Amino acid sequence: MLLAFDTATPRVTVAVADGADVLAELRSEQTMRHGEQLAPLVERALAAAGGDRTALTAVAVGVGPGPFTGLRVGLVTARTLGYVLGIPVHGVCTLDVLAAEAVASGTVDGPFTVATDARRKEVYLASYDDSGRRLTGPDVARPDDVATDGAVVGPGTELYPHAFPDGRAPLLPGAGWLARVVATTLSEGGETLPPEPLYLRRPDAAEPHRPKPVS
C-alpha cells in the first residue's frame, strides 16, 4: 500500500492507495495547523483502508511549491516514515497533482496553467500541455505579470480573478491524485522527485545577523 499526503496548501490531504486504486482519502476540516492535523489524518486513512503502517510499501509526498512551514511538516513526516519503515519516499510537484486531476476529469481540453497561492500577493504557477505534461515552471510571480485569458486551474483563480478569468477545477490538490501520479510515473518507468521542498524563495524566518562591533 502507498500512503500519500500533501501539506503545501492550507488544507492537509491524505490518501492510501493500492496502485492506482485509492482505498481511502481524507482532507483536513480546518485550514493551517498542519502539524496538529497530519498524523491523525494518516491514522484515520490507514484505518479506513483496512491496514496499518506495517502494510505500507511506499510513501508519496507533495513537495510544493508552498509555504515553508506546511511543506516542512509533510516532508519531515514522509522522510521519517520512510526511514523507520525502510520504504521508498516519492516526491511530486503539487502543481503536477492539480494538473493530473484537471486532465483526467476533463475540466481542461487544451494547454493550461496551474496557479496556487504563494502569499505576499503572488502565485506559484506552471504551464502544461493538453496531456498534463509540465512545460514551464514552477515559478513565483505577481498575478498581473502572468495574467492570461487561457484556462487556469487552482486557487489562484479565486484569489485573482482579474488576472485569471477562465478558472477551472480543481482548486486544491487531492492526495488520491498524488498517489495516482506516482503509480503512473513508476509504471511507465519514470522517476519521481526526491522528498525535498520546492520553496522557490527564501523562508520568512531567518537567523539573526551578528551584532555589529561597537567602535
Image (cartoon, rainbow, N blue to C red):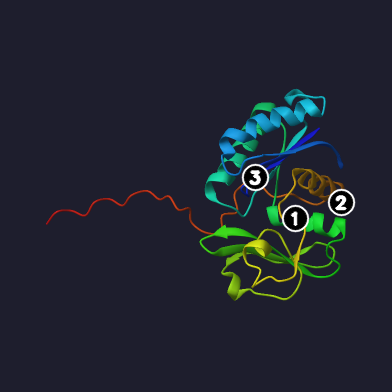
Q: Are marks 3 and 1 in contact (CB under 8 Å)?
A: no
Q: Where residue 115 sits: x, y (%)?
A: 67, 63
Work out how far the residue at label 2 is from the one at label 3, CA to CA, in angstroms: 30 Å
Q: Where residue 31 sits: x, y (%)?
A: 60, 44
What residue is rendered at 66% in x and 42% in y? 12
What residue is rendered at 81% in x and 61% in y? 132
Horizontally, residue 213 falls left or right of residue 210, namely left
What residue is rendered at 87% in x and 42% in y? 20
What residue is rendered at 59% in x and 74% in y? 144
Please determine whether, in this image, residue 19 is positioned above or below residue 128.
above
Q: Residues within 10 Å of mark 3 (few under 14, many from 20)?
A: many
Query: Can you tell which of label 2 and label 1 is closer to the viewer?
Result: 1
Nearer-N-terminus badge (2/1):
1
Work out how far the residue at label 2 is from the one at label 1, CA to CA, in angstroms: 20 Å
Work out how far the residue at label 3 is from the one at label 1, CA to CA, in angstroms: 14 Å
Q: Residues within 10 Å of mark 2 (few under 14, many from 20)?
A: few
Q: Looking at the figure, which quarter contains the C terminus?
A: bottom left
Q: Closest to the observer: 87 or 117?
A: 117
Q: Which residue is mark 3?
A: 11
Q: Are marks 2 and 1 in contact (CB under 8 Å)?
A: no
Amino acid, disc 3: Arg
Q: Secondary structure at mark 3?
A: loop
Quarter of the view holding residue 60: top right
Amino acid, disc 1: Leu
Q: Residues within 10 Å of mark 1 (few under 14, many from 20)?
A: many
Numbered label attached to residue 188: 2
Q: Which residue is mark 1?
A: 98
Quarter of the view holding residue 122: bottom right
Q: Looking at the figure, which quarter contains the N terminus?
A: top right
Q: Where residue 83 sits: x, y (%)?
A: 64, 31
Q: Closest to the observer: 71 or 153?
A: 153
